[in-house]
Image (cartoon, rainbow, N blue to C red):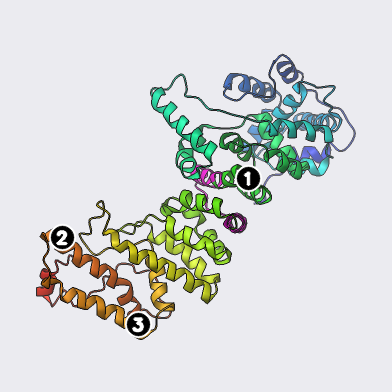
Amino acid sequence: MSASPDLVVLALAQAMEPGEEFVPIELLAITNADSNPTSTLNDMDRDNARFEAVNRDFGFLQTCRITQKPPSAEEQDRLVAMMRWLLRELREWTVVADSNCQKLAAIFVITTYCSQHGNFWPEFAASSTVNPEIVAELSKRIARLQFMSAPSSRSRTPISDKNILDRFNAADRAGDWAVVASDWSRLGDILFPDSFLSQSVRYLHAFAQNALRLATEEVRQTMPVMLLLSSLSVANCLALALASTNPYVRFGSILRLFQQQRRRNESISQTEENLLTQLLQSIATDSVQWQKWMVALNRYPLRYPQIQQSLGRALAQAPDAALQPYIGAIDLTTTGISRSTVAECLRAFRSVASLDRRKMFWRLAYERWSQWRFGEDEPTQALMKVGYCELDYAIVGYAVECLNNQERDKKCTTLLAELSSIDEEWHASATVFMQVVNRILSFFQPFAYTRQIGPDDDWLMEGRLMLPFDPQTDRYNSMFFMIRL
């Protein structure tokens, strides 16, 4: 079954022919009476009044989209007449004639209404020409955009809300992306641009992308940047970030990706993934920003599965100095809670990185893993059973690609000798003894697994416990070493 044509796009094509215009008198009266027509942020009543005026004339658009029934001839003619008015007004608009942007505000209410279920601005741009005065006016307004959120007067927790906002704003000023990313999920879901701001961004994106980039370069706060970015698709945000030097726009494009996927339960598209890879490669050349990004996005990889494929491919091409910040940022746990997520990143890395590059990465990962020793010096890590780690995939990579058979066997032999002599040492308690046993067996896992791995096997151990004895038949060692299957 073929899809019904977009009524607005159809009307745009028909509006190219001479004919009558429809002037939205009621809407113009509302915006002309407004002392601040270009902003309805946090003022739902004023915003609703504008859209109600449009809905009275063009509510049939919603009905037709739902019912899939065509409008009447009179309704379609009215829509065509409105498109003629829009085309002419946007073509002829001047700041002298509309210094307070009252008419432009009305125009943008209509374009917002027409954009709800269609591809309005690309089609409109194909039917019209750029107005340099509109570009200049919108660029100026975007460049000066500021926005500071305050606790709601209706909040039941105004003090804690203020503390959260104060912490966020302090981190934002410092470019502390870890705090910004952590707190944005609570702030971003209640922040939306109004029609004038969203349509300003979309007009510039359709007619003057370089002007949009230059204007956003001046905005150095996350909240106003996110108001701007939320008016664009994720792919367009990532493309803008690639062309930008503004760290707020660049990191904001990542927040925009997370926000859309959480709201709409969408997976990342191939176009978005390619743009994200390019952006991460670009960030990796800036050691200061890369370090901040890794602390924000890679301390808990499980939170950000969307970026793993792109991050892995970016690591394959990034400067050598970018590898250690990636590895060092990961919060290592003895349960390996993020090990599957990290493995997804490293599979992508392995698929495109050269052998020398892979060996460099595996050695850096092995060095950190060896020094960490399954949280031996961390009082919060109680190793009461054989542990796993976020870096398991990389450690198997080290054993496979950096060691030969003799070196792998030596690793296993050394660990087994350490395990065999464990009863010759004094342990303060059964708990301490159990942790020592489990630490040795945890180190043993990747090397023992590597000795059994096939050419088509994945490098991440799943559901397998590698032991130097069979616990089903060797009951003594199972009890002595307190093995729990």
Residue at the limit of the structure toward the top, as seen here: 33
Q: Are marks 2 and 1 in contact (CB under 8 Å)?
A: no
Residue pointed to by mark 2: 432
**Closest to the observer: 139 or 86?**
139
**Closest to the observer: 396 or 197?**
396
Q: Compute the Cα span from label 1 to label 3.
A: 51 Å
Picture residue at 15% right of the left edge, 71% below the top: 422
Between disc 2 and disc 1, the foreground one is 2
Picture residue at 71% right of the left edge, 38% below the top: 215
133 horizontally vs 4: left or right: right
Q: Compute the Cα span from label 2 to label 1.
A: 54 Å
In the image, residue 279 lies in the stretch drawn in magenta: yes
244 horizontally vs 328: left or right: right
Q: Which amino acid is tagged 2?
A: Val
Q: What secondary structure is the magenta-colored segment mainly?
A: helix
Compared to residue 328, the image places residue 99 above or below, namely above
Residue at the limit of the structure toward the right, as seen here: 18
Residue pointed to by mark 1: 233
SS at mark 3? helix
Q: Which amino acid is tagged 1?
A: Ser
Residue at the limit of the structure toward the bottom, as seen here: 406
At which x and y percent is residue 42? Answer: 57, 24
Residue 100 visible in image: yes
User: Which residues fall within the magenta stretch?
Assistant: 255-284
Q: Compute the Cα span from label 3 to label 2.
A: 30 Å
SS at mark 1? loop
Residue 407: assigned label: 3
In the image, residue 212 lies in the stretch drawn in magenta: no
At which x and y percent is residue 82? Answer: 79, 29
Picture residue at 17% right of the left edge, 67% below the top: 483
At which x and y percent is residue 435? Answer: 19, 62
